Image (tube, rainbow, N blue to C red):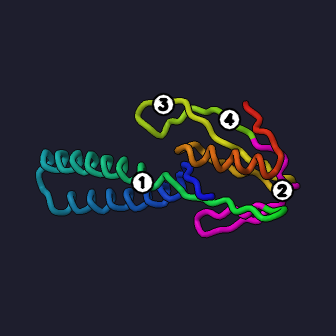
Amino acid sequence: MEFKYKCNYLFNICLYLILTLFVLTTILIFQKVSSNLTRSILLLLTIILLSIWSLLLKRKLEVTKGTFEFTKDTLNYTTLGKTYYIDFSEIEYILKEEYLDTSYLISRPSYQYIIKIKNGGTFTFKYYDYTLDTAINLLCTKTNHQIKEL
């Protein structure tokens, strides 16, 4: 079952590219432009354009696809080129937690699912669309776990 969730991993990598572009543009502006007023205007335009570009990129890069594949006793979770094999007996609990999503200009409430693995850590899936809900509900039916709400 394929699903989508929010993850800032790819956007954080791209943010370094945007920062590098800003530094290079600033160096070019200071080397090629002699007027302070023109420098200020060009720097302001650069900041505005890179901010708009980063907001547009964020919408695309923060959505990550994952897949759950079920066998008799294991869950195969694949995302970003990695596959995790988890026995159903190793899943300790599945938690639904509300949080304040600050990735937009206006903060808004959202929720995330946390899957706790015994002696292994956690997987966190921030809500993006209904496919995440259906994948988690299918996981709950396969593992006989209930979703705990926090």
Residue kind at label 1, given as amino acid type: Lys
Residue type at mark 3 is Ser
Q: Is residue 21 left or right of residue 69?
A: left
Find the magenta span and give its range.
75-94
Q: CA distance from mark 2 to mark 3?
A: 36 Å
For label 4, the crowd category at 10 Å Cα-Cα, with few meaning under 14, some 14 to 19 and many 20 or more, is some
x, y percent for residue 27: 27, 61
In primary-sequence order, the first of circles 2 and 3 is 2
Label 2, secondary structure: give it.
helix
Is residue 84 one of those drawn in magenta? yes
Q: Identify the residue at horizontal 58%, vertical 54% (top origin).
A: 3
The earlier-in-sequence mark between 1 and 3 is 1
Q: Which residue is mark 4?
A: 97
* Amino acid type at mark 2: Phe
- Identify the mark at residue 107; answer none if there is no mark: 3
Nearer to us of marks 4 and 2 is 2
* 96 with respect to 60 (left or right): right
Q: Nearer the viewer, mark 4 or mark 3?
A: 4
Q: Earlier in the sequence, mark 1 or mark 4?
A: 1
Mark 1 vs mark 2: in front: 2
Determine whether the residue tagged by mark 1 lies in a helix, strand or loop: helix
- Which residue is the site of mark 1? 60
Residue annotated with mark 2 = 88
Tell which tag, 1 or 3, sits nearer the viewer. Answer: 1
